[in-house]
């Protein structure tokens, strides 16, 4: 009886260990407190998104197979289909404020099929105000040249209390300047215009920030308004880094680069330390150029990892140039075998007699 009882305890413990292990793994992928997001109270048609960060705890690549939502008020999007070991990807939840209103919530079911099958549940909720409408729902500057300035506008419409008003507007980014002004008011209805300007100090790359409209509404004192801009530098190159693998001194390898500028230009020189570089740029100046570059290592020596910087020079104003990282493993060239000659030893007569 005692053996049977012990066996029963072991079986129970094993059965409990499986869900405990699964919960521990889920916690590593995304902690419980990060699986829920509250959008709060938002205006109708406002662009409202949230990104859930998904980490891969496995030693193999993790594949996010699919995701579905329990309510059409939320659109889930897998932004990182494959996540490398130890890396983090994202799943985006978009609250559909343009087509829904009122109190809304949704469960998002994320399916993982590699390296093992799993299902995760994420949850979002929020309240969409139908009496406040933002058009467009996001201030999208589009592509802006680095150092340039651009202004765009949006309208805020409210239908309800006659004394409703926007008192001010603020930005959490120093490169965005914004103003708000009332354009019309009638009993139970008011319209405001928001003017936003991206300033020359915006850093190159994708810029996402948020403006906040401050109101006298006790239920919605702060109305968020998303801003987006793609700030384009005067010169860019793709890919931003090159891994050449193993190379031997004198070996030739070709790379195709895409070089883009905000205006037409010529490439005047391409330099890489300890490498011979050959390239054939277009004869006429172009703002977008595909360049075939031939790289030939010049340094001989023992096997080693090499990290270098490629400099691409142009005739743009100020002789503007751009750099990208180059890495490779330099293999020692095989040396021809050394021919050895037989050594002949001459013995004296006395030494010869010693062998007799």
Image: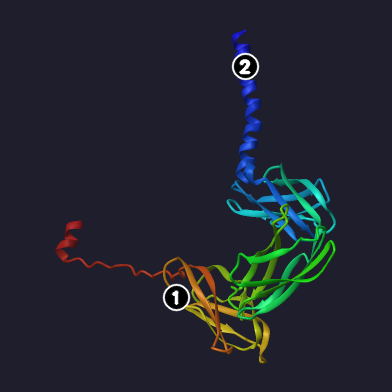
Q: Nearer the viewer, residue 229 or 87?
A: 229
Q: Which quadrant of the figure contains the N terminus?
A: top right
Callout 1 crowding tier (Cα within 10 Å): few <14, some 14–19, many ≥20: some
Residue in view at x 73 percent, y 56 percent: 217
Residue in view at x 20 percent, y 65 percent: 347
Residue 83, x across and y down, in percent: 65, 54
Residue in view at x 63 percent, y 32 percent: 20
Viewed as shown, does residue 160 lie left or right of 51? right
Answer above or below: position of 25 versus 152: above
**Residue 356 is at least partly visible in this image:** no
Viewed as shown, does residue 350 lie left or right of 113? left
> Residue 304's quadrant in the figure?
bottom left
Disc on the earlier residue, 1 or 2: 2
Label 1 element class: loop
> Residue 281's quadrant in the figure?
bottom right
Viewed as shown, does residue 90 lie left or right of 327? right
Residue 253, x across and y down, in percent: 58, 75
The residue beneath circle 2 is: 7
Q: Nearer the viewer, residue 270 or 198?
A: 198
The colour scheme of the drawn protein is rainbow
Q: How many marks?
A: 2
The residue beneath circle 1 is: 299
């Amino acid at each position: 009886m005692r053996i049977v009882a012990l066996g029963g305890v072991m079986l129970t413990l094993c059965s409990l260990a499986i869900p405990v292990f699964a919960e521990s793994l889920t916690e590593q992928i995304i902690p419980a407190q990060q699986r829920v997001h509250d959008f709060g109270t938002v205006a109708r048609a406002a662009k409202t998104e949230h990104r859930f960060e998904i980490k891969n705890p496995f030693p193999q690549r993790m594949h996010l197979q699919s995701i579905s939502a329990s309510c059409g008020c939320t659109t889930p999007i897998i932004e990182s289909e494959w996540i490398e070991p130890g890396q983090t990807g994202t799943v985006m939840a978009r609250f559909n404020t343009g087509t829904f209103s009122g109190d809304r919530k949704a469960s998002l079911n994320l399916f993982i099929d590699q390296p093992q099958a799993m299902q995760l549940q994420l949850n979002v909720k929020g309240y969409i105000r139908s009496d406040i409408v933002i058009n467009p729902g996001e201030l999208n500057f589009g592509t802006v040249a680095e150092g340039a300035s651009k202004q765009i506008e949006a309208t805020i419409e409210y239908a309800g209390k006659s004394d409703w008003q926007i008192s001010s507007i603020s930005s959490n980014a120093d490169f965005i300047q914004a103003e708000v002004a009332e354009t019309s008011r009638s009993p139970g209805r008011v319209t405001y215009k928001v003017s936003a300007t991206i300033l020359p100090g915006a850093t190159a790359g994708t810029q996402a920030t948020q403006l906040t409209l401050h109101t006298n509404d006790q239920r919605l004192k702060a109305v968020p308004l998303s801003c987006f801009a793609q700030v384009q530098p005067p010169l860019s190159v793709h890919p931003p880094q090159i891994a050449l693998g193993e190379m031997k001194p004198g070996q030739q390898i070709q790379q195709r680069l895409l070089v883009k500028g905000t205006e037409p230009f010529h490439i005047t020189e391409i330099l890489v330390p300890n490498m011979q570089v050959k390239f054939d740029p277009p004869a006429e100046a172009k703002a977008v150029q595909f360049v075939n570059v031939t790289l030939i290592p010049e340094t001989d020596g023992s096997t080693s990892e090499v990290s270098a910087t490629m400099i691409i020079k142009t005739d743009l104003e100020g002789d503007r140039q751009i750099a990208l990282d180059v890495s490779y493993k330099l293999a020692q060239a095989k040396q021809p075998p050394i021919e050895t000659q037989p050594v002949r030893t001459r013995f004296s007569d006395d030494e010869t007699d010693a062998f007799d």
